[in-house]
Image (cartoon, grey):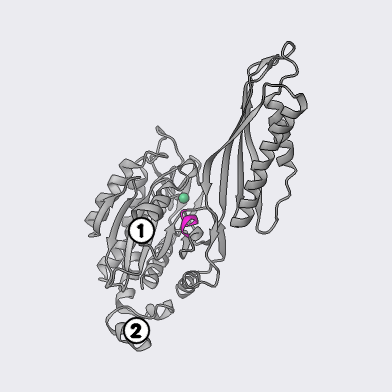
Amino acid sequence: MKLLSLTLCTTFLCAAQDPSALLQDPTVKAALEAVQRNEPKFIEEQIRICEIPAPPFKETERGQELKRLFTSLGLKNVRIDQVGNVIGVRPGQNARPNLVFSAHLDTVFPEGTNVKVTRDGSVLKGPGIGDDCRGLAVMLATIQALNEAKVQTPGAITFVADVGEEGLGDLRGVKNLFYESLKGQIDKFISVDGTGLGIAHIGVGSMRYRVTFKGPGGHSFGAFGMANPIHAMGRAIAKIGDFEVPANPKTTFNIGRVGGGTSVNAIPFECWMEVDMRSSDNASLKALDAKFNAAVRAAADEENHRWNSTAKVTVSPELVGLRPPGQTAANSPIVQTALAVSKALGLREMLREGSTDSNVPMNMNIPAITISGGGAGTGAHSLNETFDTTNSWKGTQRALLLAIALAR
Ligand SMILES: [Zn+2]
C-alpha cells in the first residue's frame, strides 16, 4: 500500500499528512498565488452576494445565485436539494474520499432588513457580511483557484451552500445533507463560517423546549381550589433553577421567556415557558434533558396533588430546537491537518468550540471542523456587522490548502 501511494504521488498531489510538503508542489503554489491575486474580485462577490437577502427559511434567491455561480465555475451535477441546499461537485481522480466544503446561505435577519453593504477603507459594513457571506466568498475563491491552477485532487470535493444554519433554522440544511441528500456519501466535512482564523473542533449542542401548562381555568375566588397552570410552572421553574450541572464539559440551562394568563383575578387556563439547554457532551445533555422532563412532569403532579381537584393541570414539553453535540478529537487527522496547514502558512490559531453546521457530522463521528474565513469581523448577528478585509486572503489560502490536503 505504501508503494502504491508513492506511485500515485508522482501523478497526483501528494504528502497528504504534510501540508508544508504540499507547498512545494507547483500546482499548489499556483493555486495559492491565484487566491491572493483574486481576493479583491471575491471581496466584490462577497458584497454582491450579501446584498441578496437570505432571511431564515427564505434563502431561495441567494441559493439560485450560488447555483448559477457553481455552474459557471464548472462544478458537476449542480443541483438544489429538497430543503434548498445548493450542491456541486468538483470530481477527483476517485469518487471517494468525498470532502464536503460548505458555507451557509442564511442570515439571522428578517425580511425587509436593509442589506446594502457600505465601505469605509478596508472595512465593509452590512448585515451578514461576515456571517456567512465571508464563507460563501471563500468557497467560490477556492473553486476558482483550484480551476486556475488545474489542481487535480485524488478524492472529490463537494461544495455546498447550505440553508438553515442559524437559530430557528435548527441546522435543517446540514441535517438534510447528512440524513437524506448526501446520506452515506460524506467522508470529511469542513464548514467555513464567519471571520478570523479559528478552528472549531467541539460542537456545543443545544435542546430547546417550549413547555405549555394547561388547565380548565376559572374565577380566582369562585373557583379557588382548582389546580393552577402558572403555579405548576412556578414549581417547575424552581426545580430547574436548582439543577446542578457539570462545569466541565460546560453544561448550561436557561429559562428565557415565560407567558400566559388572562387576568389577575382568573385562574389561568394556559401558560408557557421557553427553555434552552446546552453542552458539548452528548451524555451530559441527555442527562440534563431527562432531569428537565422529569421536573416539569413532577411539577404538574405536585400542583394537582396539592389541590386534589378533579380539574387537572397538564404539561406538554415541545422540543423546538435540537442541535446535536459532538466533537472531533484534537488528535484526529482532520484537526491535525488543519493545524499543520495553518502552521505551514505561518498562521497561529488555537482550537476552540462552536455551534455550527459541523455539529451534525461530529455527532455522527464523521471527521468535521469549522474554520473561519479570514479577515476580522465585529458585530455578527447585528445590523452593524463589519468585516475588515485586511489580509483576508490568508483565510482563503488556508481554506484552499486545507481542502487540497483533505481531498485524498
Ligand atoms: Zn454562521
Residue 379: in sight, yes or no?
no
Q: Say which residue appears at 37% left-offset and 61% top-offset.
A: 184
Please tell me the numbered disc located at residue 5.
Answer: 2
Dot 1: element: helix
Residue drawn 41% across and 39% down?
55
The type of residue carrying mark 2 is Ser
- Tell me the tag on residue 239: none
Using the rendered image of the protein, determine whether residue 383 is visible from the camera's viewpoint.
Answer: yes
Tell me where residue 124 appears, x and y as whole percent: 43, 48
Q: Amino acid at mark 1?
A: Met
**268 shown above or below 131:** above
Marks 2/1 in contact by CB < 8 Å: the verdict is no
* Residue sticking out furthest to the front: 310
Q: Is residue 64 left or right of residue 304?
A: left
Which comes sooner in the sequence, label 2 or label 1?
Answer: 2
Image quadrant where one finds the N terminus: bottom left
> Measuring 42% from the left and 67% from the top, which residue is drawn there?
398
Q: Locate residue 191, reporting x and y percent.
A: 43, 58
Q: Residue placed farthest to the top in the image? A: 222
Look at mark 1 in the image and give the residue it sits on: 139
Mark 1 residue crowding within 10 angstroms, few (<14) / some (14–19) / many (20+)? many
Q: Nearer the viewer, residue 247 or 65?
A: 247
**Image height check: is 201 above or below 109?**
below
Instruction: Give the extent of the magenta segment.
Output: 357-361
Residue 105, x across and y down, in percent: 38, 47
Q: CA distance from mark 2 to mark 1?
A: 28 Å
Image position, residue 75 (x, y; %):
25, 59
Q: Quadrant of the C terminus?
A: bottom left
- Please identify the dominant SS of the magenta region: helix
